[in-house]
Amino acid sequence: MIIYVIWIWIKNSEIMVKIKEGFTGERAFVLPIPIIEEFRKTDLGSLLYITDIGYYPKASFHFRRRKKEEASQYILIYCIEGEGWFELDNQTQKVIANQVFVLPKEKAHSYGSDAKNPWTIYWCHFDGEKAVFFAEGLRKPLLISAEKDSRIEDRFKLFEDIFFTLKNGFSRENLDFSITALFYFLGSLKYLGVFRSNNTDKPELQQFDMVDDAIHFMRENVRKRLTLKQIADYVGYSTSHFSAKFQSKTGYSPLNYLIHLKIQEACHYLDFSDMKINQISMLVGFDDPFYFARIFGKTMGSSPSEYRKRKKG
């Protein structure tokens, strides 16, 4: 059960009200301490290990504060949408969409989502001999904007692989794979340019046209609620000119094409995960699971639950 904390200041006094609710579509996983302690004794686990990992969509009133002695791991937070903040060394940093940061261990800190525009975040607590190496340079928010070679969705899928591997059990093989994937995930942030330059989906990026650029932007932001103007602005055209060109080439309006990409992504998680439908809905950018179910049915000809039961292959 997640605890929201609303905090307000009145005459220099901090009043905290706890609300016992979770975030709709949330996913979180905490590794048992005996499993962590045993894994830390291995060659790989001594270098890097995970203690907690999760995903919080539109996390209204999300708030955490830890004293120095409570901050026993490094904490990575990747803001996908919305806004938030964190406080470290008596300095407050604002966090916006597409930014990632790492809080160091053994440092008092606090963080939370913006009251008016709450963040959607991937998060992970980790430690080990190499943790400080990957955390270096991320004490201030790093902006990872969607560009032709950004590979943002590749990184998110890697995070999902880590989460689901751990969720499937604590075999030595699962633990080793999850940490190997974490090395790659953290490396994709530390060596951002190298990660982007190894994009195998871009044989000749410079030959992309406006529609290709737009589709790439949609794929990189498939988990967000994009507007037509945001897509048109990305490719540098008016909404009317962009829409006409896009429909002429693809046969779909830009937003309808985006919906198809979102439903395609949802089908992947229905096929290959045990996530609840409302969790998948939030993951692909639908706040309302009932609206998601209607759009899914209109697109696929069946409800999400019926699609999941269908024999495939």
Image (cartoon, rainbow, N blue to C red):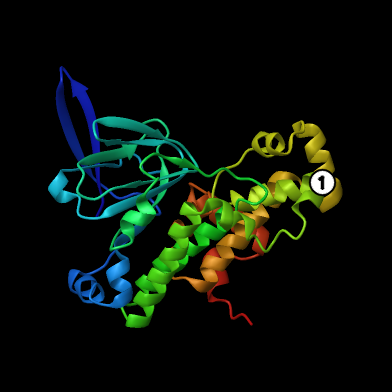
Residue 277 lies left or right of residue 172; in this view the side is right
In the picture, which quadrant includes the C terminus?
Answer: bottom right
User: Percent from the top left, x then y, of residue 149?
Assistant: 65, 52
Residue 131 lies left or right of residue 83; in this view the side is left
Residue in the image at 19% along x and 40% along y: 18
Which residue is farthest right?
A: 248
Residue bearing the label numbered 1: 247
The kind of secondary structure element at disc 1 is helix
Q: How many marks?
A: 1
Is residue 200 positioned above or below 170 on the image?
above
User: Percent from the top left, x then y, of residue 289?
Assistant: 48, 53
Q: Residues within 10 Å of mark 1 (few under 14, many from 20)?
A: some
Is residue 42 positioned above or below 249 on the image?
below
In the picture, which quadrant includes the N terminus?
Answer: bottom left
Residue in the image at 34% along x and 75% along y: 175
- Say if residue 106 shows up in the picture: yes
Q: 132 and 117: which one is in front?
A: 132
Residue 45 lies left or right of residue 65; in this view the side is right
- Say if residue 277 shows up in the picture: no
User: Percent from the top left, x then y, of residue 123?
Assistant: 36, 53
Identity of the amino acid at label 1? Answer: Gln
User: Percent from the top left, x then y, of residue 301?
Assistant: 66, 64
Residue in the image at 47% along x and 70% along y: 273
Which residue is farthest top?
A: 11
